[in-house]
Image (cartoon, grey):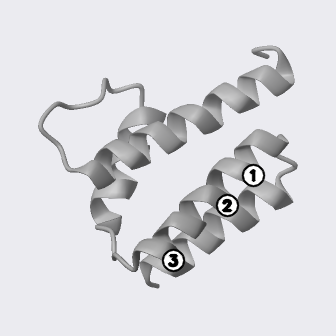
Amino acid sequence: MNDTDLHKQALDLAIESGAPPEDIEFHQGNLDRHLEEGNEMNTDDFLRGQKDCQEGIPAKQQQSEDYQRGYAAQYQHEANQDALTDGH
């Protein structure tokens, strides 16, 4: 699976899970930027950032931009989910 597939998968998952519009727009924006830039991201770093956020580990300093993006994407996703459920 390449980076474009990962972005599409994240967008599809957000849509299928009934995520709020701002979450879907966030993932669509990531996909659009990825396609416009033509850059391949380091998916391992992105997924590591997501995992650290999921596990409640504070964002690590001196990490790649892809790590930071993964952490931020997960943080935003969780904030949107909390807003939808009023934190329940």
Q: Of the residues under marks 2 and 3, which one precedes in the sequence?
A: 2
Answer yes or no: do the residues labelled 2 and 1 have beta carbons within 8 Å?
yes
Q: Amino acid at mark 2?
A: Gln
Q: Nearer the viewer, residue 33 or 52?
A: 33
**Cα separation between marks 1 and 3:** 17 Å
Q: Nearer the viewer, residue 88 or 82?
A: 82
**Helix, strand or loop under label 2:** helix
Q: Is residue 15 depicted above or below 76 in this figure?
A: below
Instruction: Judge from the rendering whether residue 10 lies leftward or rightward of residue 74; answer left or right.
Output: right
Residue in the image at 29% along x and 29% along y: 59
Residue that numbered label 2 is attached to: 28
Residue in the image at 20% along x and 50% along y: 64
Label of residue 24 in the image: 1
Residue that numbered label 3 is attached to: 35
Q: Nearer the viewer, residue 50 or 41?
A: 41
Q: Residue furthest left?
A: 62
**Cα separation between marks 2 and 3:** 11 Å
Q: Nearer the viewer, mark 1 or mark 3?
A: 3
Q: Amino acid at mark 3?
A: Leu
Instruction: Judge from the rendering whether residue 36 lies leftward or rightward of residue 18; answer left or right.
Output: left
Residue in the image at 55% along x and 59% along y: 30
Answer yes or no: do the residues labelled 1 and 3 have beta carbons within 8 Å?
no
- The 10 Å Cα crowd at callout 2, few under 14, some 14 to 19, many 20 or more, is some
Q: Is residue 6 depicted above or below 60 in this figure?
A: below
- The 10 Å Cα crowd at callout 3, few under 14, some 14 to 19, many 20 or more, is some
Residue 37 quadrant: bottom left
Rendering coords of residue 56 (x, y %): 41, 25
